[in-house]
Amino acid sequence: CAFVAPSRGFTTNNIPSGLRRKKYVGRYGELTMQQQQTNIKIACLQLAVGADKPANIKNAEAQIAEAARNGAELVVLPECMNSPYGVKYFPEYAENVVEGASETAQMLSAAARDNKVFLIGGSFPERTPDGKLYNSCYSFNHDGDMVALHKKIHLFDIDIPGEITFKESDALSAGDSPTIFDLSEHGGPPVRIGVGICYDIRFPELCWIYRNLGCNLLVFPGAFNMVTGPAHWDLLARSRAMDTQSFVAFCSPARDTSADYTAWGHTIVADPWGQTVGQLDENPGILYADLDLTQSVKRRLNMPYHL
């Protein structure tokens, strides 16, 4: 299912003995913060994506392997990692994962397994058995098992006169569930991840849900454009990190000025203090970041501002 309820590692009944803990109670229930020295190395892949789907998939596969060779434990891909971004492309590039007709999902599963990494597979157009299309993000553990599915909740329907008009809802249906999964349930460190896609980041209520259910890392595959990117990309990543006192990874495809939709690029990781940990320019590349997860604990204990 898309939503995973709070579970081991983040409830008071399942804290391993010997770990110091502090807890506080609010309107969303009890939230336990573990004080445990833990780090994770993540890699965000700013992929060059074009009209050739097999080439896009092969390139993503190669870049996942490259990130793993460089020590990444968690790899993140961008929005629309196997297709151009555009309403006219979604039906053409959509794949039916449920019925096993998805070369993209098969590659992602195999890449996670073969490289022994946790993988947030960006997003790609998905066709469900009822014929609906979604902008979907599949996540996998290091055994290649699919552990979470996020369907973009807030569709990108905007009209900025004289600058950009785009309406995802002309082709896509909206998801209706937050998506959380915990690496500690799959042999990894205590990283509880909330997933969104692109426009989802503009809705702080979603991020507050993730924060109040114990997430310490929020991941957003996204593809802002040349209007919204310069204005809001960095601002939103750092704001959501500060709002939730979590790490935020905002992963874009690389910029292609010949495409119908030109992505801003500038993949970024922000820390719980709202500072930039690392950032790319507009070109293809891999952003590596070593996250000290105790930062989230420290900020939440030293400056609590969530009920």
Image (spheres, rainbow, N blue to C red):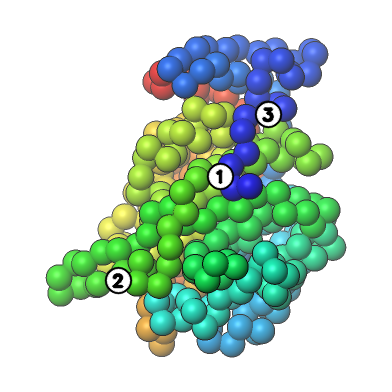
Marks 3,2: beta carbons within 8 A: no
Question: 202 above or below 257?
Answer: above
Residue 267 appears anywhere in the view: no
Does label 3 or label 1 sit earlier along the sequence? Answer: 3
Q: CA distance from mark 2 to mark 1?
A: 25 Å
Does label 2 or label 1 sit earlier along the sequence? Answer: 2
Residue, disc 3: 7
Q: Quadrant of residue 8?
A: top right
Find numbered disc 2 in the image and state the secondary structure of the residue it sits on.
strand
Residue, disc 1: 179
Q: Position of residue 94 (x, y in %)?
A: 56, 75
Residue, disc 2: 166
Q: Quadrant of the C terminus?
A: top left
Find numbered disc 3 in the image and state the secondary structure of the residue it sits on.
loop
Is 215 or 230 nearer to us in this picture?
Answer: 215
* Amino acid type, residue under disc 3 in the picture: Ser
* Amino acid type, residue under disc 1 in the picture: Thr
